[in-house]
Amino acid sequence: MKKSYIVIGVIVVLVLIAFFTGKSAYNNMTTLEQEVEEVWGKVQVQYQRRMDLIPNMVETVKGYAAHESKTYENVTRARAGLSDAYNDARANDNVDPANEQSFNNFAASQEKLNKALSIYVNAVREAYPDLKADTQFTNLQTVLEGTENRIATERGRYTEIVKKYNVAVKRFPANIWAGIFGFSAKPQFQADPQAANAPTVQF
C-alpha cells in the first residue's frame, strides 16, 4: 500500500513538473512569436514606404526631363528595369514570414528592387546632372535615404528577435514542447554583400 502511494506521489510530481515546464515554455515561445510578428510588421512598413516613394521619384524625373528632346537610352533602360523589379516586389508583397519559400521570395524581390533603384538613380545622375537643383527631387532623395536607413534598422531588429525565438524553440527541452505546441523555427534574411548599402542617390 505504501509503495502505491509512493508511485502515485512520484507520478503526480512528474505531472506537475511537466505541466509547469510546458506552461513556461509555451508562454515564452508565444511571447517571442508575438514580438517577431510585431517587428516583422515594422519591417514591412518600411519596405512599403520605399515602394510608395519610387513612383514619385520616377514621375519627378520624367517631369524634369520632359523638356529634353533627346531620349537617353540608359535612363529608359534603367526605368524599365526598375519597373520590372517594382512589379515583382508587388507580386511578392503578400509574404508569410513563417513560410520559408514565401519569405525568401519576398527578400529576393526587395533586394532586386533595391539594386534596380540604384541603377536607375545612377543613370539619371549621369543623364541629368542639373536635377540636383530641383527641390522636389532633393526632398524625395532625402526621404528615400532615410527610408533605406530605417529598413536596415528594422531588419537588424528582426534578425535579433528571430535569432532569440529560434534558439528558444530549438533548445532542449523546450524543443520538445515546441514540437507539441506547433512552434517552428522562422527563416532569416540571408546576408547579401550589398545589402548594407543603400541605393546611391547622391547627386
Image (cartoon, rainbow, N blue to C red):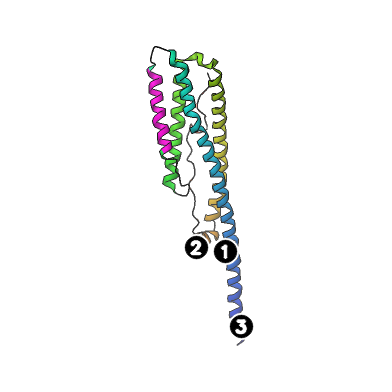
Gap in angstroms between the C-alphas marked 1 and 3: 25 Å
Residues in magenta, as a range: 73-90
In the image, residue 32 lies at what x, y percent?
57, 52
Quadrant of the rendered structure where residue 24 is?
bottom right
Between 96 and 179, the one nearer to me in the picture: 96
Give amino acid for label 2. Ile
The residue under label 1 is 22
The residue under label 2 is 180
Q: Residue at x 49, y 44 (%)?
A: 188
Please give left or right for residue 69 compared with residue 165 in the image: left
In the image, residue 97 lies at what x, y percent?
48, 47
Where is 9 relative to 24, above or below? below
Of the 4 image quadrants, the one containing the N terminus is bottom right
The residue under label 3 is 5
Q: Residue at x 61, y 81 (%)?
A: 6
Q: Which is nearer the N-term, disc 3 or disc 2?
A: 3
Q: Which is nearer the N-term, disc 1 or disc 3?
A: 3
Instruction: Name the main secondary structure of what is drawn in magenta.
Output: helix
